[in-house]
């Protein structure tokens, strides 16, 4: 086994997040967990599958050796985004031009493979380390993160530090924005399109409200800033409404994505600000199906982060505008940073890939990290 063949094996086990495509044969994390469990068991890990949603487990692999040691974890997520529109075979894991191609090669089976292979290389010394190095595979990261939320609630107190697998070019991402996904809806009055004045067009009400929000809320978000993350932002991602061209629509909805800095979280959060703006401008909108993930910030002088940064001086401490499972671990009191080979620029793309050389550098990185213990 090499890290390249290991990553190919991981990519060839489809694990698309079923929230995106619930009825697809490629959906769900169980096959990935079932692939990893015997592998880690053969290296001496005690493996548990904790079912978070039906057929969708977290995998927790506890390192061999004494149970009374301090514990840290390496924690990538098991799921990927959907494969629609991909221009390469999503599950072939072919090698071309020094790159491995396919869904998850960058986000985040590449970092997962590097973590796993480093554990494999060090499997005979793990029991003797002064720190236990566990492996945790989180389900559901690509949609609402139920896996890391559950783990944080039930297991955060068992660990001192977490390294969450994401493609960060082997830099320590120690601060990220929070994220609010929210649906806003409005209603109208349906009538025949030949007499629109007798109805009330919900789409027009919605688009007028969105135009105002895009101007006013964007300006308000710009006042919440961070020295690394810059300012909070708004994106209007989808819009739906109406049923037929000859009917005045009586319903319309849009989904919003607000990425927000820690100071906005301290001020009450993005959902509260959205509610305030809707009330302030008397907009005919109702917020439904809101899901808010917190920002993440591990101070640069945290002892564990300093230990690893000192041992691996080629890696910088950086911030990122995206969110990850690390945010929920931090929110529960478990300091966590994101780290892994590959670039976030390749994540979720139609031709997703990771360079073989970056993957191999990732193995060296995590082996050095384990040696630093």
Image: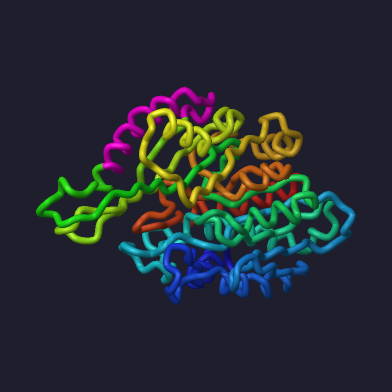
Q: Is residue 270 above or below residue 340?
A: above
Q: Is residue 47 magenta?
A: no
Q: Position of residue 208 (x, y in %)?
A: 27, 37
Magenta residue span: 205-231
Return the x and y of residue 111 as percentages of the image width and height.
Answer: 56, 55
Residue 312 coordinates in the image, percent (x, y) = 66, 39
Would you say 333 lies left or right of 238 here?
A: right
In the figure, is residue 304 to the left or right of 323?
A: right
Q: Which quarter of the figure is the N terminus placed in? A: bottom right
State the image coordinates of residue 257 (x, y, percent, origin top left): 43, 43
Which quadrant of the view contains residue 235? top left
Who is closer to the viewer here, 264 or 46? 264
Could you say which quadrant of the image residue 64 lies in? Answer: bottom right
Most foreground residue, 118 or 52:
52
Q: How many marks?
A: 0
Residue 210 falls within the magenta-colored stretch: yes
Query: Residue placed at 73% from the left, 50% from the top?
Result: 370
Taking the spot 12% from the left edge, 51% from the top edge, the residue there is 195
């Amino acid at each position: 086994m090499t890290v390249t063949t290991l990553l190919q094996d991981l990519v060839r086990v489809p694990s698309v997040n079923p929230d995106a495509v619930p009825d697809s044969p490629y959906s769900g994390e169980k096959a990935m967990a079932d692939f990893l469990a015997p592998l880690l068991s053969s290296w001496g890990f005690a493996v548990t599958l904790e079912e978070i949603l039906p057929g969708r487990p977290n995998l927790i692999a506890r390192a061999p050796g004494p149970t009374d040691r301090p514990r840290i974890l390496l924690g990538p997520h098991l799921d990927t985004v959907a494969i629609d529109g991909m221009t390469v075979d999503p599950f072939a894991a072919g090698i071309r031009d020094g790159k491995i191609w396919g869904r998850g090669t960058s986000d985040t089976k590449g970092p997962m493979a590097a973590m796993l292979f480093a554990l494999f290389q060090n499997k005979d010394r793990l029991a003797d380390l002064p720190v236990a190095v566990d492996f945790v595979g989180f389900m559901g990261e690509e949609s609402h993160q139920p896996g890391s939320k559950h783990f944080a609630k039930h297991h955060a107190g068992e660990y001192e530090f977490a390294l969450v697998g994401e493609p960060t070019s082997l830099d320590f991402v120690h601060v990220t924005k929070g994220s609010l996904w929210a649906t806003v809806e409005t209603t109208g009055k349906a009538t025949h399109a030949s007499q629109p004045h007798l109805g009330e067009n919900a789409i027009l009400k919605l688009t007028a409200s969105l135009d105002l929000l895009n101007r006013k809320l964007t300006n308000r978000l710009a006042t919440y800033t961070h020295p690394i993350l810059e300012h909070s932002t708004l994106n209007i991602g989808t819009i739906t409404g109406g049923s037929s061209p000859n009917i005045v629509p009586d319903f319309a909805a849009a989904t919003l994505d607000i990425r927000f800095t820690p100071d906005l979280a301290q001020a009450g959060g993005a959902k509260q600000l959205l509610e305030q703006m809707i009330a302030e401008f008397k907009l005919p909108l109702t917020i439904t199906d809101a899901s808010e993930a917190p920002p993440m910030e591990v101070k640069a002088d945290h002892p564990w982060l300093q230990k690893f940064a000192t041992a691996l001086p080629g890696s910088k401490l950086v911030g990122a505008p995206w969110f990850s499972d690390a945010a929920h671990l931090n929110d529960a009191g478990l300091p966590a940073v994101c780290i892994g080979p590959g670039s976030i620029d390749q994540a979720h793309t139609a031709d997703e890939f990771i360079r073989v050389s970056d993957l191999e550098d990732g193995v060296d990185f995590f082996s050095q990290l384990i040696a630093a213990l």
